[in-house]
Amino acid sequence: MRFLTALLLAGAAVFTAGSQAAQAADLPTKARPLPVAAAPVWSWTGLYIGAHVGGAWGTIESEFAGFGGGGAFPIASGTVNGFLGGGQIGYNFQSGIVVFGIEADASWSNLEGTTPCLFGALSCNREVDFLGTITGRLGFTADRALIYVKGGGAWAHVEHNATFLGGGPGFTLSADKTIWGWTVGTGVEYAITGNWSAKLEYNYMDFGTNSLGFSVPAGPGGTIDVDTTTSIHAVKFGVNYRFGGYDVARY
């Protein structure tokens, strides 16, 4: 009798365990979680256009070269300063944290200055009304910031006027010329959204020495050749718009 009771209890236990295992097998399994997308990563690669405003200042020195068959004869040294504004276009390529690029910009400016010249006999006015650069850029990224240096060619259009102040009939000698030189600079640019960025930039432009022919309006006529040496510093704040989508999601 005891043996039969034990056998029945063992059978009941096996049946209960089997039922529980079958029920567990019929339960639905949880789906595997989807991969979580990381925060979008900014890429600087692509074509962009933009606009800028800022200020500039510089020095212009004038002299007669080879005066009297000898050395140079100084006429004046003065400063120019004013505002500028314009636009830029460029292309960047990013590889890792390194960004390579090329950029061209052009600015209207009103850099102007007046100084006595030729021992006070003349009043010399100088104006730079256009500026431009074509440069290569090399930068390094830090999150959404791009810190870069740049260098290349520069051009400017300058106008010179020298007015006689000797008390007699007044007259003005004038000359204008597009001059060419080189530039170096540095800046930082920050990505605001998927297409827009803002930058702050400094440029130094050196145009060397250029010969200008001042026209004589009366008397003997003709021209007077004067050598001018020009250098300009510029600080610009700008915004750029990049074409296409540049927020790239990584998993």
Image (cartoon, rainbow, N blue to C red):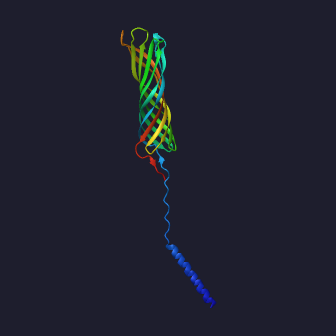
Q: Which quadrant does the N terminus fall into?
A: bottom right
Q: Is residue 10 left or right of residue 138?
A: right
- Residue 241 pos. (x, y %): 42, 41
Total numbered badges shown on the rendered structure: 0
Q: Residue at x 39, y 14 (%)?
A: 172
Q: Residue at x 47, y 34 (%)?
A: 237
Q: Residue at x 57, y 83 (%)?
A: 12
- Residue 88 pos. (x, y %): 42, 35
Q: Residue furthest right?
A: 2
Q: Residue furthest front?
A: 167
Q: Residue furthest bottom?
A: 1
Whether residue 186 is visible to the viewer of this picture, yes or no, is yes
Q: Is residue 186 left or right of residue 213?
A: right
Query: Which one is in front, 175 or 82?
Result: 82
Whether residue 205 is visible to the viewer of this picture, yes or no, is no
- Residue 224 pos. (x, y %): 40, 14
Q: Residue at x 45, y 36 (%)?
A: 238
- Residue 35 pos. (x, y %): 49, 57
Q: Is residue 179 above or below residue 117?
A: below
